[in-house]
Amino acid sequence: MSQMKAAVIAAANAPWALEDRAVPEIGPNEVLVRIHACGICGTDVWMADGTLSFHDFPLVLGHEGVGEVVAVGAGVTRRKVGDRVGIPMAQKVCGVCDFCHEEHPVSFVSGVNCANPTLTGVTVDGAFAEYIAADAAGTVLLPDGIPYEDAAPTLCAGYTVWAALRKVDPKPGARIAVVGIGGLGHLAIQYAKAAGYHVTAVTRTPDKQDLARELGADTVVADGAALRAAGGADVLMHTSSSHAAIVDAMNGLKPWGKVVLMGVATDELPLPAGPVAFQGYEVIGSAHNGMEYLVEALDLVARGAVKPMVNVFPKERVGEAFEVARSGKARFKAVVTF
């Protein structure tokens, strides 16, 4: 076992191509994981086309990787050969920079602010490969019975929306509006419903309206005015690729309502200053927030309360999987199996 297949991007906007690469060697406190599936995230698309740049091409992307531990390095006590694990984006921080001296827990925020973080598929090679070396403490155990194809998109997309919902901590009986029904939004509807909230889906796309109801939405509306007429929302979950959509949806936000931002878009976000001030709105950023929320997100999928909608591609069709994800034609997550 010296060679493996990996999906490599040679340059910005170059096709994803399977190449032979050496199986990575593991060091102390690391595990070698045989990848079974990895989901394509919107961040992968932006790194592949050069919109986001963290290290030089060629790139091996992928931070929604799941598989089986096949070897452990010196000092590893919490993982063993045969464990089914996921490797989320934030594996570890450097521990020596000024930010790390403040002793924050490992999360997306600490990964962004650390001077030299280990971010899967971002600062180091990712999980679009047959094998990956990872920090043992930066892996998460998968619940028994969860299929790899469902676990993969939960590693980022499911983690993102569940952590956001937990961060805003809505009151019992709160009205949650999910703005945008895509890779994040179709999961946000299900997680909010599983938590017992009244859920309104906000989408202008006609073919997603019936689907939103099937996913558990109590109400489906097209815009903020319709959201207000339908009873409004205590929390807006921004999962859209358009900031304009969330600004419009704020027309349906109730007094003291919260907007939680987790979707990333390239247009500006011109917040309406008057309503934010006079209605007491809170605008909250959220991204993963801690491994405990990933554990909870995976458990809800394992118990059948949430079901990711995935398009599965074998590794030989990784280029096709990427094109489907980039075009927005995936319903709703493209997952590559290895």
Image (cartoon, rainbow, N blue to C red):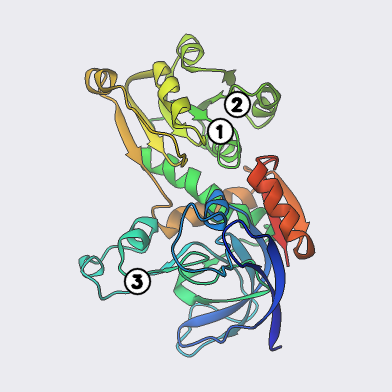
Q: Nearer the N terminus, badge 3 or badge 2?
A: 3
Q: Where does the image place residue 314, in percent across and percent down from the top left?
A: 78, 61
Q: Where does the image place residue 113, in percent across and percent down from the top left?
A: 30, 60
Q: Nearer the N terminus, badge 1 or badge 2?
A: 1
**Residue at (54, 38) in percent of width and height:** 188
- Which label belongs to residue 217? 2
Quarter occupied by the C terminus:
bottom right
Amino acid under disc 3: Asn
Q: Which element is circle 1 on?
A: helix
Q: Which element is circle 2 on?
A: loop
Residue 180 lies, with reference to residue 334, above or below; the image says: above
34 or 180: which is nearer to us? 180
**Residue at (64, 53) in percent of width and height:** 302
25 or 55: which is nearer to us? 55
**Residue at (55, 61) in percent of width and height:** 63
Residue 86, image quadrant: bottom right
Point out the frontmost of discs 1 and 2. 2
Label 2 Cα neighbours within 10 Å, binned few <14 / some 14-19 / many ≥20: many
84 or 7: which is nearer to us? 7
Label 3 Cα neighbours within 10 Å, binned few <14 / some 14-19 / many ≥20: some
Q: Which residue is mark 1?
A: 193
Query: Alpha-carbon distance for marks 1 and 2?
Result: 7 Å
Quarter occupied by the N terminus:
bottom right
**Residue at (41, 28) in percent of width and height:** 235
Q: Nearer the N terminus, badge 3 or badge 1?
A: 3
Residue contact at pointers 1 and 2, CB within 8 angstroms: yes
Q: Which residue is mark 3?
A: 116
Residue 24 lies, with reference to residue 55, above or below; the image says: below
Is 288 left or right of 212, judged from the image as shown?
Answer: left
